[in-house]
Amino acid sequence: MQGKTVRAGEVLEVDIDGSAGLTAALVAAVSEASDRAEDHQAAVVVLRIRGDAAPGVPVPDMALLTKWESALRRLERLPAACVAAMLGPCAGAALDAALAADYRIAHPTVVLTLCVESGDVWPGTALYRMSRLSQRAPVRLAALFGEPVSVGDALAAGLVDEVAEEPSANVGRLVERLTGVWGPDLAIRRDLLWGSAAEFEGALGGHLAACDRVLRRLRDSA
C-alpha cells in the first residue's frame, strides 16, 4: 500500500511505490517515519522501494514537490540510520527516496530511471544526489558508520591519487614536477575546485560544532 508505515521493534518500515507517483499520502508517510525516528521510537528506518514511472500518473504541483523535498531532506538528517531495500525498477519518487538513504541494497532487476513520461530528464534533486554519491560509497560508509577505507577504495574514491611500493621515492619524482607550479593562481584554482571560501567557512562552523559534541561525549564517558 502506497505510504504505509509499519513499526517493528526498533525498525520502522515505509513502503514506497514509484508507479503510484508522488502523493500527499507518501509525503505524510515519510514525514511520519522521520517524526518517530526523531522521537527515538526507531533506530533504523527501512524504505522498501519499487516502482517505475507508470503512464498517466498525474504530475504533482509545486506545493507537493516542495513538501516532498523537505521530507527527503529530513531523511538525510535523521538521528537514525536509513536503509533502502530496492526491490525493482526505480523512478520518480522511488528513486528520490532511495538516493536519500544512507545505505542502498538493490535487487538485480533494479534500473534507475530519471526520465518522466514525456521523455525529458526530470531536473529534481535526484540529479544532485547521484552526482554526489557516484564512486563515493566507501567514503560515505566510513563517515557514517566508521567503516575503514582500504587503499584500493581510497584510490577509486579519489582520496589518494597514487599507490606505490616506495611512496618516498615517488614523492621525489613528483616534487620535481611540481616545483614550477607555485604561485597565487594555485590557491585560486583550488578554490574553484572546492567551492568558495564563504561556503567553506559556513561548513566549518557545523563541522566544528559536531566535533565538539563528539569530544564532550568522550569526556563524559571517560
Image (cartoon, rainbow, N blue to C red):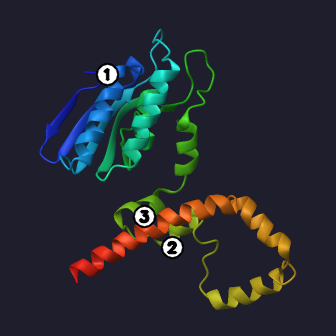
In the rendered image, which quarter contains the C terminus?
A: bottom left
Other-residue count near label 3 (Cα within 10 Å), few / some / many at <14 / 14–19 / ≥20: few
Q: Is residue 128 above or below residue 68?
A: below
In the rendered image, which quarter contains the N terminus?
A: top left
Mark 1, residue position: 25
Q: Mark 3 or mark 1: which is in front?
A: 1
Residue reaching furthest to the right: 180
Mark 3 and 1 residues: CB-CB less than 8 Å, in contact? Answer: no
The tag earlier along the polypeptide, 2 or 3, is 3
Res 90 visible: no
**What is the C-alpha distance between the residues marked 3 and 1?**
33 Å
Other-residue count near label 1 (Cα within 10 Å), few / some / many at <14 / 14–19 / ≥20: few
| Residue type pointed to by label 2 | Val
Q: Position of residue 108 (x, y in %)?
A: 39, 38
Q: Position of residue 13 (x, y in %)?
A: 23, 37
Left-right relation of 49 to 199: left
Mark 3, residue position: 143
